[in-house]
Image (cartoon, helix red, strand yellow):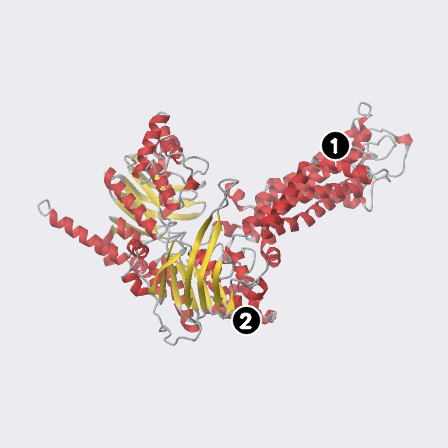
């Protein structure tokens, strides 16, 4: 019998159908990848297994875990299961830990609760578990609080909590989505090792086909609450029998066709010139008498960007790329160094002198939910940069400018009178781009513009950027930790590490043949669907070759 | 099309539907409306003229002519409650207006400015908070003389730091949002951003705070009038009526009962309204219901 068996599971909340006839099974020691776009019901499936559904949710069907009928199990039985035989890892390591408890306490808590172990024994086990997930006590004492750890380290603590009692099944819901690629690779390695050590089942939920292809033995693809296809990972992804599987795979590896060749003609002066820029942040004083230290977020960065050029700024989280972007947008001032944009000095100019420069540069943010004032209509939101126009446009002019911008990004001009919450994530990102292009700027700075979007929508937005870049001659600076995005869109790339730009060159050259250690680490850690499938094929072939007699 | 449930629920129609289903909001609204109507009607008409004294009719119990009885000077208590409502509401309303009118801009300015200006303003706030509000109001009216206007000013001053603090806290939560960054990238200054983006987004918490301060204002006014520092006779006020009733509590308990009930019911109504408003306007609280 399988460790986990789900048969005909349906779930509805109120009158909304969330899941329809889900069939899944998972064996001991197996990794099952659950893939789908947002709203496909993958997280709800996980919550059903844990019986942590929102109130008013009704589940029907059969869910058997280790011989226990989960849907009919009383709450006390579920409490015994959760955190013991059933572990769960959440997406956001920042909120999954209690900020007022030490990491030792949080790991030991579950051990004490489930095994009745005394404080000292539980602490010993917690210590071993934390060491196992890569937080040895010598460097990370149990008395540390979550805020003293980085995102990746926190996710390790979350995994330690989930795995402290050697669960039979671990559910990981987008465990690496909030982490940069290098941390992602480390966390995935850790999960894989834990599965192999303890013969644990792992249900890995992700929107990222590449991650799943790398990790999962079998894969289940979901859409709109129903299973589209399920099967052995490489077979499913290589044969792509189901049209939706093909669509997902294509979107994941999508590269927009570049209509425009990179301009050979170099204009006399570059559009943007960043010269030896430094940004220090003051640290909190350690004592009253020592001077406050400083953290150097950006360290003597220099580069130039020509008109119409697209360049990517890649690096791990916390490397200073967003700080640099804010200084380029004149939202923050460098501690020293000079930034010249289109002939205007940005670093030393007063706010009132920045108007002319601001007119020619705009920004697109990562989060399509947070980048709009929820109380304004789309017309007002998109028209915001018109504030920079020397002559205030009349109401009709304004409406026609907004309509043009919306059409440019592929939305109908009727969107104007609606509110942002009426649009999906991808549509909102289009609105965000419309706002950025309404003044016909020369430069757009895009901070992780697609990392919050589903793969199929991501592909559309990438196409849109490529198209706008070609048709409007926009220069773009893409800030991203996703190398596929950088590869898809940009001519050149800069790799940033600990505040410095360590490598710079044509995108293809740098990624195919990275020279410096940080660049190599990024390229190696980046999940890549084709490579993952290739590796998987080799591995199964090797296994088959060593075991011919048993078959 | 996938829509974030929090955003979806914040549409105008949803708020209305939500409000209609919220019991404490409806009860609070009903009570507040009745009290406000009473005050409004008293401007044109009261059952009896409250300035006319009929000593022959003094300390009458409840009857058809005088539903709430009469006081020690023979005035109709129901009429006095009506006029007193007008007084209470006017004092509390203007006091909340003063508090919000000065406090909200200050708080928004502090949040926009940060740094030493913010620090200085907030410490000044703490200083005002450190004084017991009613005691200081007594001090102010003692210095500038009793009367409704001075009571308004005294209560208003103590509303300023409350609104400043709430506005600042709300604004601080909005400032790091990306749409503010986008607005700054569009060259908008701190003032314009505060007016266009910050204030509309903190309006709901300010509204809720307003209803609570309103209730506190009515209580404070009653307290001041009770001490003889609020509205002066012949202008009736609930607090003053309680004071007058005090010595005759054994003979005529209804003298204290009705103004006391008026205060309790009004404050209760406003608190219910504020509570309900918070639930209606805050999607997080709402979803847990």
Q: Which residue is mark 1?
A: B260
Specify few, some or many for label 1: CA neighbours under 10 Å numbering under 14, 14-19, or 20 or more: some
Side of B133 where B185 appears, left or right: left
Side of A252 where A469 appears, left or right: right
Most extreme residue toward the left, as rendered?
A549
Most extreme residue toward the top, as rendered?
B250
**Could you tell me which quadrant the N terminus of chain B lies in?**
bottom left
Q: Which residue is mark 2?
A: A400
In percent of width and height, residue A15 lies at 45, 47
The verdict on a common chain for dots 2 and 1 is no
In the displayed structure, A545 sits above or below A485; it is above
- Out of A78 and A354, give the one closest to the viewer: A354
- Out of A40 and A382, give the one closest to the viewer: A382
Q: Secondary structure at mark 2?
A: helix
- Mark 2 in CB contact with mark 1 (< 8 angstroms): no
Residue B278 picture quarter: top right
Q: Residue under mark 2: which chain is it in?
A: A
| Number of numbered discs overlaid on the protein picture | 2
Q: What distance separates the C-alpha of mark 2 from that of mark 1?
A: 61 Å
Residue A115 shows in the view: no
Specify few, some or many for label 2: CA neighbours under 10 Å numbering under 14, 14-19, or 20 or more: few
Q: Residue under mark 1: which chain is it in?
A: B
In the displayed structure, A141 sits above or below A186; it is above
In the displayed structure, B178 sits above or below A81; it is below
- Out of B40 and A320, give the one closest to the viewer: A320
Q: Which mark is residue A526?
A: none
In percent of width and height, residue A448 lies at 41, 58
Q: Secondary structure at mark 1?
A: helix
Most extreme residue toward the bottom, as rendered?
A265
Camera-near label (2 vs 1) is 2
Side of A336 where A3 appears, left or right: left
């Amino acid at each position: 019998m399988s460790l986990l068996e789900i048969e005909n599971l349906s779930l509805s909340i109120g009158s909304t159908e969330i899941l329809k006839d889900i069939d899944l099974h998972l064996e001991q020691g197996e990794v099952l990848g659950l893939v789908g776009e947002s709203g496909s019901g993958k997280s709800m499936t996980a919550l059903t297994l844990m019986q942590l559904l929102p109130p008013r949710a009704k589940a029907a069907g059969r869910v058997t875990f280790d011989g226990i009928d989960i849907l009919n199990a009383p709450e006390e039985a579920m409490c015994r299961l959760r955190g013991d035989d059933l572990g769960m890892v959440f997406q956001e390591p920042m909120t999954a830990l209690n900020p007022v408890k030490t990491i030792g306490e949080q790991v030991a808590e579950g051990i004490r609760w489930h095994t009745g172990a005394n404080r000292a024994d539980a602490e010993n086990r917690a210590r071993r578990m934390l060491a196992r997930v890569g937080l040895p006590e010598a460097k990370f004492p149990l008395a540390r609080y979550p805020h003293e750890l980085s995102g990746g380290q926190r996710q390790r603590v979350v995994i330690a909590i989930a795995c402290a009692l050697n669960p039979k099944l671990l559910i990981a819901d987008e465990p690496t989505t909030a982490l940069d690629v290098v941390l992602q690779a480390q966390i995935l390695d850790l999960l894989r090792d834990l599965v192999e050590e303890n013969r644990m089942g792992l249900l890995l939920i992700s929107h990222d086909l590449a991650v799943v292809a790398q990790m999962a033995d079998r894969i289940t693809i979901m859409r709109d609450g129903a299973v589209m296809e399920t099967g052995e990972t490489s077979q499913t992804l290589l044969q792509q029998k189901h049209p939706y599987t093909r669509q997902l795979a294509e979107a994941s590896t999508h590269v927009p066709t570049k209509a425009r060749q990179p301009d050979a003609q170099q204009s006399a002066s570059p559009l943007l010139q960043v010269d030896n820029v430094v940004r220090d942040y003051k640290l909190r004083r350690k004592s009253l008498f020592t001077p406050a230290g400083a953290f150097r977020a950006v360290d003597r960065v220099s580069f130039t960007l020509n008109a119409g050029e697209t360049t990517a700024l890649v690096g791990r989280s916390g490397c200073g790329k967003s700080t640099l972007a804010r200084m380029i947008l004149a939202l923050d001032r460098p501690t020293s160094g000079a930034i010249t944009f289109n002939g205007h000095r940005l670093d030393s100019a007063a706010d009132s002198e920045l108007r002319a420069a601001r007119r020619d540069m705009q920004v697109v943010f990562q989060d399509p939910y947070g980048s709009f004032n929820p109380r304004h209509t789309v017309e007002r939101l998109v028209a915001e940069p018109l504030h920079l126009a020397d002559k205030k446009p009349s109401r009709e002019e304004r409406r026609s400018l907004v309509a043009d911008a919306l059409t440019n990004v592929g939305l109908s001009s009727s969107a104007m009178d609606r509110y942002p919450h009426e649009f999906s994530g991808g549509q909102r990102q289009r609105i965000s781009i419309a706002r950025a292009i309404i003044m016909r700027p020369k430069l757009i700075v895009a901070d992780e513009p697609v990392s919050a979007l589903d793969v199929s929508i991501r592909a559309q937005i990438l196409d849109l950027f490529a198209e706008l870049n070609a048709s409007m001659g926009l220069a773009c600076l893409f800030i991203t930790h996703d190398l596929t995005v950088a590869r898809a869109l940009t001519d050149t790339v800069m790799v940033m590490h600990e505040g410095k730009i360590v490598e710079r060159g044509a995108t293809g050259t740098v990624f195919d043949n990275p020279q410096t250690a940080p660049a190599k680490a990024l390229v190696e850690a980046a999940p890549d669907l084709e490579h993952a499938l290739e590796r998987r094929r080799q591995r199964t072939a090797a296994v088959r070759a060593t075991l011919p007699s048993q078959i | 099309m996938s829509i974030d449930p929090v955003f979806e629920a914040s549409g105008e129609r949803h708020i209305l539907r939500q409000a209609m289903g919220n019991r404490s909001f409806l009860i609070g609204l009903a009570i507040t409306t009745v009290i406000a109507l009473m005050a409004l009607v008293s401007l044109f008409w009261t059952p009896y003229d409250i300035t006319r004294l009929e000593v022959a009719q003094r300390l009458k119990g409840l009857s058809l002519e005088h539903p709430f009885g009469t006081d020690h000077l023979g005035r109709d208590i129901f009429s006095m409650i009506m006029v007193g409502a007008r007084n209470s509401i006017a004092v509390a309303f203007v006091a909340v207006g003063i508090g919000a009118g000065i406090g909200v801009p200050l708080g928004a300015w502090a949040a926009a400015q940060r740094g030493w200006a913010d620090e200085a303003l907030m410490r000044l706030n703490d200083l005002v908070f450190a004084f017991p509000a009613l005691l200081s109001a007594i001090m102010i009216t003692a210095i500038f003389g009793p009367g409704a206007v001075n009571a308004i000013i005294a209560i208003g001053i103590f509303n300023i730091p409350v609104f400043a603090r709430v506005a600042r806290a709300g604004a601080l939560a909005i400032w790091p949002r990306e749409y503010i960054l986008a607005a700054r990238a569009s060259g908008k200054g701190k003032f314009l951003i505060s007016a266009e983006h910050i204030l509309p987004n903190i309006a709901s918490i300010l509204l809720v705070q307003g209803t609570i301060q309103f209730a506190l204002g009515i209580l404070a006014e009653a307290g001041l009038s009770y001490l003889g520092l609020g509205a002066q006779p012949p202008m009736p006020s609930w607090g003053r009526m309680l004071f007058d009733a005090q010595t005759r509590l054994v003979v005529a308990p209804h003298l204290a009962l009705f103004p006391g009930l008026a205060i309790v019911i009004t404050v209760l109504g406003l608190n219910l309204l504020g509570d309900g408003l918070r639930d209606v306007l805050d999607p997080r609280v709402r979803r847990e219901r």
